[in-house]
Structures are given as C-alpha cells and as structure tokens.
Image: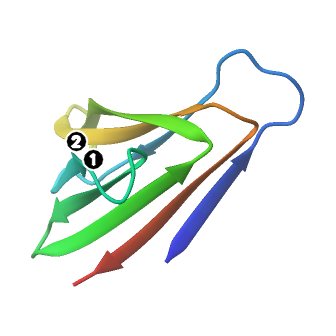
Amino acid sequence: MLEVVDTIEGGFDDAAGRLFFHPGLNLRPGGPSADAGHAEGMGGNRLRWQVKGAEISMAQTAFHPEFGIDEPNQCLEMRFSQPVCAVRLTWSQ
C-alpha cells in the first residue's frame, strides 16, 4: 500500500493533482465509491486507487520515453475539493 497526501496551505480557487500511469495500464473507474477505480495490465497485475478530498477524472495523455517518441497513456486527475487530497494505491498480482 502507498498513500500520497497533498496539502495546500492558504486559500485556493482551483487546484489539481495528477498521477500519470504507465502506457501498459488501462484505467477503469469503479470500486467501493465514486472516488475509486483500478488499473489492469502488465501481466495481469491489478492496481487499485481510492481518492479522498478531490473529484476525479481520467484523461488521455502521452508518455515520452525518448526524444520524439510519444506513447499514449492515461492520467488520473484529482481536482481538490478541500485543502488536503489523499490517494491510496494498493496492488496485487
């Protein structure tokens, strides 16, 4: 298990955290709540996430392993709804 906690001190109008995933993983929403989901791929491994303190969305982005090379990947975007946002990652094989 890995938990990343992002804290903003002071006021803010709009803030987002982004977690970019390896091109071999496919993100899927769903889980015990609307702020959870999982990623599958790479030999059947499964990564689960749950976010607190933010609204989540998934975006298509690009990974650049070398100059001039673009590989499609996905990003989990977390729009802060309060000053503290936490994302918990768990995995299994």
In terms of image quadrants, where is residue 64? top left
As drawn, which residue projects farthest toward the top? 13
Circle 2 sits on which residue? 73
Looking at the image, which is closer to me, 72 or 79?
79
Instruction: Check disc 1 and report its element: helix, strand or loop.
Output: loop
User: Could you classify mark 1 by the number of other residues whose Cα lies within 10 Å: few (under 14), some (14-19), or many (20 or more)?
Assistant: few
Residue visible at 85% across and 22% down? 11
Is residue 41 shown above or below 63? Answer: below
**Residue type of the residue flagged with mark 1:** Pro
As drawn, which residue projects farthest toward the right? 10
Instruction: Check disc 2 and report its element: helix, strand or loop.
Output: strand
Tell me if 49 is positioned left or right of 5 in this view: left
Tell me if 71 is positioned left or right of 76 in this view: left
Tell me if 68 is positioned left or right of 89 in this view: left
| Spot occupied by residue 6 in the image (x, y as percentages of width and height) | 69, 48
Q: Nearer the viewer, mark 2 or mark 1?
A: 2
- Tag of residue 65: 1
| Spot occupied by residue 63 in the image (x, y as percentages of width and height) | 28, 40
| Spot occupied by residue 49 in the image (x, y as percentages of width and height) | 40, 59
> Which coloring applies here?
rainbow
Q: Residues at badges 2 and 1 in contact (C-beta under 8 Å)?
A: no
| Spot occupied by residue 18 in the image (x, y as percentages of width and height) | 48, 39
As drawn, which residue projects farthest toward the left? 43
Looking at the image, is mark 2 or mark 1 earlier in the sequence? 1
